[in-house]
Image: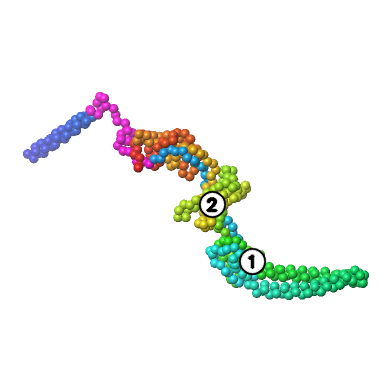
Amino acid sequence: MKRKIDYETKRSINMNSQRSAILFLLAGLIVAVPACGPGKKAADPAAAALESAGATVVTVVSAARRTISEKLTYTGVLEAWRKINITPETGGKLARIHVEEGQRVAQDQLLAELDSEAIGLQLKQAEAGLAVADANFQNAARNKDRMDRLAAEKAVSDQQYEQVKLGYDAAKAQLEQAQAGVNLARHARDTGIMKAPWSGIVASKNAQVGDVLNPMMGGGYGAPTGVLTLMDDSRIKVLVEVSPGDIGRLQKGRPALLRVVNGEIKDHPGTISVLNPTADPMSKKFRVEVLVDNADRTIRPGTFGSILFEVQSHQNALSVPQKSILNDKFVFIVENGKAVRREVALGLRNTTMVEVLSGLREGDVVILEGNYGLIEGSAVEIKK
């Protein structure tokens, strides 16, 4: 009895499964017939993808005419245009330094002094020797005057006259020698007093009070010499290394632009002051100096900045931002809410803009952002 029940159960399950399969196949046929029936076309996969994706949000810019300039950009080192090491011409012990590092000083301001005691004694000694030499010369001059009168009257022999004349010449030479000694001592005293040759800022202190200075000996390779280093930062000198391909496009006296980043980007006009025609033997590049006014002292020496050289300019050039150009050969414009691809020929470039020689008309609405990944005919929505 049990076996008969199991058999009936299995038979019922199998019949139900067959009915379900038949119903599934019939449903598929019913759905398929309208899709493939007369008058219907298979759907275009690209069009279906565009229709389902929705519009791409883009920002745009109008192609417009403007002046566009081609610029070369180089990174350079900023330095004060004048810098000098304050060093005494004579050796001695450093007695006083009157300024501090970073202090601004005026022209002829006292900066430092050597110990003047020994120099003062030498000056007194020289002045005493000068007084003796002057007295001897005055005596010799009086003797010569008397001898001149006697010689005119034929009252003395030639030998006597020559002897007095020789004494006069010797006294005169001794006086000149003594005067030179005084001048030398005074010069040593004056050079021991170090003053600013021009207004500037004390960039560094290279010696300490008590150091014995010898101007004939440097501070070692690369080390600053002297007592102080004074620099004039009222103008800034920018040093750049220019490639052989660009050096011929620059001219001395032409304008340049220094761009520095110090919390914010600032541009400072300058002028090419040095254009070295000889390449560096190691780098094979050419040294160019640009001089920039820094009267407000906002540019800091010792830092880096970018120098922009304008090499040529086109007036009334049709141009668009560089980031609207894809692969340097095409752009997308907006027409009737769709993205349309346009092949373009390019001309001059600067840091942000590029000249379009062909492929665009003035006023064309060019996609600026959102253009990557677009395809011809994509629906676009302009971001307000």
Q: Identify residue for label 1.
A: 88
**Left or right relative to 185: residue 159:** right
- Quadrant of the image occupied by residue 226: bottom right
Q: Is residue 110 visible?
A: yes
Magenta-drawn segment: 33-59
Q: Secondary structure at mark 2?
A: strand
Indicate whether residue 39 is drawn in magenta: yes
Residue at image point 44% right, 41% down: 321
**Left or right relative to 18: residue 364:** right
**Left or right relative to 89: residue 131:** right
Indicate whether residue 80 is drawn in magenta: no
What is the tally of numbered marks visible in this picture?
2
Residue at image point 56% right, 44% down: 246
**Left or right relative to 298: residue 35:** left
Q: Nearer the viewer, residue 88 or 45?
A: 88
Residue at image point 57% right, 46% down: 254
The numbered dot on residue 76 is 2
Q: Residue furthest left?
A: 1
- Closest to the camera, between mark 1 and mark 2, is 1
Residue at image point 78% right, 74% down: 135
- How far from the left and from the top, in percent, is residue 2? 8, 40
Q: Secondary structure at mark 1?
A: loop
| Quadrant, the N terminus | top left
| Quadrant, the C terminus | top left
- Quadrant of the image occupied by residue 380: top left
Q: Describe the colour scheme in one phrase.
A: rainbow
- How far from the left and from the top, in percent, is residue 373? 38, 39
Dot 1 amino acid type: Pro
Dot 2 amino acid type: Gly
Marks 1 and 2 sit apart, C-alpha to C-alpha, by 33 Å
